[in-house]
Image: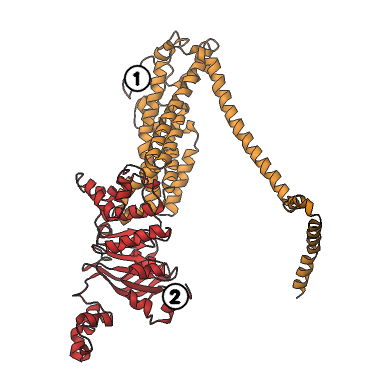
Chain colours: A red, B orange
Amino acid sequence: MSTTQLKNAFSFENAVKLGAGTDYENRAEFENAIGVYTEEKNENAIQIENLNLWYGKHQALKNISMDIPKNKVFSFIGPSGCGKSTFLRTMNRMNDMIQDCRIEGKIIIDDEEIYSRETDVTDLRKRVGMVFQKANPFPMSIYENVAYGPKIHGVSKKEIPSIVEESLKAAALWDEVKDRLKSPALSLSGGQQQRLCIARTLAVKPEIILFDEPCSALDPISTGKIEELMTELKKKYTIIIVTHNMQQATRISDYTAFFLSGELIVSGKTAQIFENPQDKRTEGYITGRFG
Amino acid sequence: MTFENKDLSGKRNPAPKKESQKTTCQKNSFQKSTCQKNAFQKTAYRKRQDFFQKAAFLAMKLSIISVILILLLIVGDIFIKGYSAITWEFLTEMPSNQMTEGGILPCIIGTVELVALSLLVAVPLGIIAAVYLTEYAADGKIKNCIEQAVNNLAGTPSVIFGLFGMALFIKYIGLPMSLLTASLTMGLLIMPAIIRTTQEALLSVPKEYREASHALGVTKWETIRRAVLPSAFSGMITGIIISVGRAAGETAPILFTGAVYYYPRLPDSVFSPFMALSYHLYVMATESMNIELTRSLQYGTAFVLLAIVFVMNLAAVGVRKYYKMKFKPN
């Protein structure tokens, strides 16, 4: 059954037709109860269909199908080695650089199959930005770090200073660094470096931003700043975050997916998954009994 | 079970001793300080470790001191015996009277030009080769073979390079004995070192920089050009510093390809033969008409050669330092 068929089956209209719609006052209430987002309400930024991934002979992702809604924060949780980071990296094809990595299935972004031959990988990565676990600014000045992407993508020289300022403002770093844009990026604190990396990603104007455990090396205050930033960023961008921190997932994400040894166990609204976990394994993990 | 018993008995034996020590400590409460000292007393094993550590440090210090001493001895000896020869005329005039008088200007110019030209040959080629080997070539037999070949080239005696340069550039291609031919030969000689050091420098660039750049939608080539090479720059400079010294000092490669005994003119083109400090020194010390008479000139020449290499290295170190300051915090 395709995603659209599935959606139609669970739509409000269908429910009314079947007589179940009468239990709910309106569409919103129905959708909230059933936990299905329809296209009118939320477009999907990414659709994943039957994705399988192998590292050599080891299968790291097993038949994953899910939709990532636009302008929401989607968090991936699960124990180490469950494949969530690998899954995240399939979305901007960062796994391409790993030898022996084989992928089957479909990932569709804006009606384009990103693993098809016609896809320009660099163009894809411009649209799907990524922030890494360890802040990795280049050994250049703060300004140069943010200007790096636009410069290489051929943005005219006049526009670059304003892009740098915009990006740093959007990453909530401008006020802290506006007087020392020329100083080395590596002189910033860990949290500032991570926000600089976010600014650098924003500077190439992506649609989707992937965060791979962005706060795992940061103190609570820096973490708080980045979480605040994400809630701000989701107004303009679709955000996917891999996290080991359950509280973080509940604090910032609208949707959550739980992975276990390469399989997608459950995915849905964060509140539902955390308050009413249907699956024993999910419950065990989020309550800290394993993982 | 038997094992457990043994273990227990083994543990029991030292235990009473400790207890007795404790009890004595408690009894002589006034001697508490001495008791505490006893608790931290070095065991025989620690003492032996300390001894080896001290011995190792001493060996390191001695070897460093001897390296510095040897360097000072060489430079000092050359300076003491040669400084009397170094005058303004010595640095700015042509050699005269069968090289027993006059200056070494053509040699100075020749050496500087030789170093510059051979770097011009070797640095771009070496860097491109190193980038290809580290960034593009897939791991495998072919890459291994190339890397081994580079290593072997780096260890090939310089006289072989000289003969090869003569055979290839002069006999086969038909270039004249000239500055160009010598520079090409010298370029081949220093290229392996440049490839090796550039490779090391590229490998030391953290993987994160490449990932970050790729994630911004930057192509592999642009990533190498804008993020990897600048980060590897200071390591690459190290290779160039080593090469400057070699290019200025090696005599055999230019002996057959361009340096001449006596050519008291400044080279007017790259196709003219030239004089070089290293070869000039060799000639004056072994083959000139009056070796004893020109002793101080020889030391003067050696000193100038050292000084040129030193100044060039200093410049490279300066560039490296500037680059580091620009990109890295203190």
Mark 2 Cα within 10 Å, few/some/many (few <14, many 20+)?
some
| Left or right: A201 in relation to B315 | left
Mark 1 sits on what residue? B267
| Left or right: A170 in relation to B161 | left
Mark 2 sits on what residue? A285
Image coordinates of residue B57 in percent, x first then y, are 64, 40
Image coordinates of residue A254 in percent, x first then y, are 30, 71
Determine the image quadrant of residue B69: top right
Q: Residue at x 67, y 41 (%)?
A: B54
Residue type at mark 2: give it: Tyr
Above-or-below relation of A178 to B248: below
Above-or-below relation of A89 to B235: below
Residue nearest the observer in this picture, B239 or B136: B239
Instruction: Determine the chain carrying the residue at label 2.
Output: A
Q: Residue at x 24, y 80 (%)?
A: A31
Determine the image quadrant of residue B317: top left
* Total residue callouts: 2
Residue type at mark 1: give it: Pro
Residue nearest the observer in this picture, A257 or A116: A257
Image coordinates of residue A190 in percent, x first then y, are 40, 53
Above-or-below relation of B228 to A62: above
